[in-house]
Amino acid sequence: MPPGPGFDVAGVALTRFLELHVKVDQSDTSTAIPRCVITCEGEGSQNIDREPDRNLLTRVALYVLRCHDQHGFPLQTSIHIKNDIPLGRGLGSSGACVVAGLMLANEVGGLELSKDRMLDYCLMIERHPDNVAAALYGGFVGTYLSDLDAEDMVRKEIPLSEVLPAPAGGVDTGLKPPIPPLGIGNHMKFPWSPSIKAIVIIPDFVKVFNMQRIAILTHALGQSPPNPELIYSGMQDAIHQPYRKELIPGLSEILQSVKPKTHPGLLGICLSGAGPTILALATDNFEHIAEEIINKFSGANVQCKWSLLEPANEGAT
């Protein structure tokens, strides 16, 4: 998820995970048509599509497999999705889903793709490198898109509807999807002080200024002990948050009143991604800070839940 002024530029992987439990039964040859059965549990499970030709995760996996001349999942593939990331809340659920689809294809297809090559495939589908790079590499990551040559610049995005079968398990179209160029995006890992934890408050509904601050923030988050004044200033945003204040009840009051000077232990606060989740970084008094923000949302008739998270440094495994 991208913090404050890092929207579309930097992201941090936190300890909420999307897990896949995959079983391939090659011994069952009762049907000549490859089958994929999807089951789900966790956040948003009731809204996750169980059809492989409509589920984003399996569509990504099929795209990658077909780029490598594998036209579907192995016979009798069972995928159980265990999701701990709230959907559509600015916590990078779509980026995690795309990365999970890449990991699924890499595993069942025996592709042995490097993570750098996986990033190329991710960016053919998810054009926000901050989210996918954080999920893929873990930790606090900065990203940028590479300049492509003229031939690659004129290429269109993947026409998934043309390269995936419909209906699920139906006849393969036989079309090979466009393979991504090498090195679409680049990333760099920044240090993160181990004393900094992330308080995420999740409501139950729905450039120069920023560049100066992201430059400060990437340095400040690696300092020990952390500097609250520097981090709070670095997490200010003049591009995305002002336009979302009217869309998220209570956001304006929260951003104006919850500060390190009035809330000991707080380092900084911002909208997580496109929102409506609030991200607060702190070293102490986590519950008090969360309850203060939740109370302000309650005053705007918005109910919330909260979690205390840490950076997940390993990335996709």
Image (tube, helix red, strand yellow):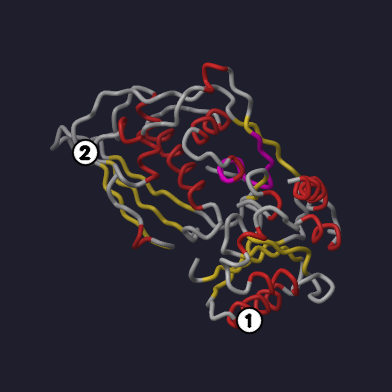
Write the residue at 62% across / 32% down. Answer: 145
Q: Position of residue 52 (x, y in %)?
A: 29, 44
Write the residue at 77% across / 60% down. Answer: 195
Asked whether 106 or 1 is in front, the reply is: 1
Write the residue at 37% across / 25% down. Answer: 177
When the figure is inspected, residue 47 is found, relative to residue 111, above or below; the finding is below
Q: Position of residue 67 (x, y in %)?
A: 39, 25
Q: Amino acid at mark 1?
A: Asn
Asked whether 224 or 122 is in front, the reply is: 122
Q: Position of residue 174 (x, y in %)?
A: 26, 23
Q: Residues within 10 Å of mark 2 (few under 14, many from 20)?
A: some
Q: Reading the chain from its start, which is encountered first: label 2 or label 1? A: 2
Disc 2 versus disc 1: nearer the observer: 1
What secondary structure is found at the residue carrying circle 2? loop
Q: Is residue 268 magenta?
A: no
Asked whether 264 or 126 is in front, the reply is: 126
When the figure is inspected, residue 48 is found, relative to residue 163, above or below; the finding is below
Q: Is residue 133 left or right of residue 102?
A: right
What secondary structure is found at the residue carrying circle 1? helix
CA distance separating discs 2 and 1? 49 Å
Q: Is residue 14 left or right of residue 81?
A: right
- Magenta stretch: give its range: 131-144
Q: Amino acid at mark 2?
A: Gly
Q: Which mark is residue 169?
A: 2
Q: Which mark is residue 95?
A: none
Q: Residues within 10 Å of mark 1 (few under 14, many from 20)?
A: some
Kindly indicate whether the residue at mark 1 contacts the one at mark 2 (C-beta within 8 angstroms): no
The residue that mark 1 highlights is 295
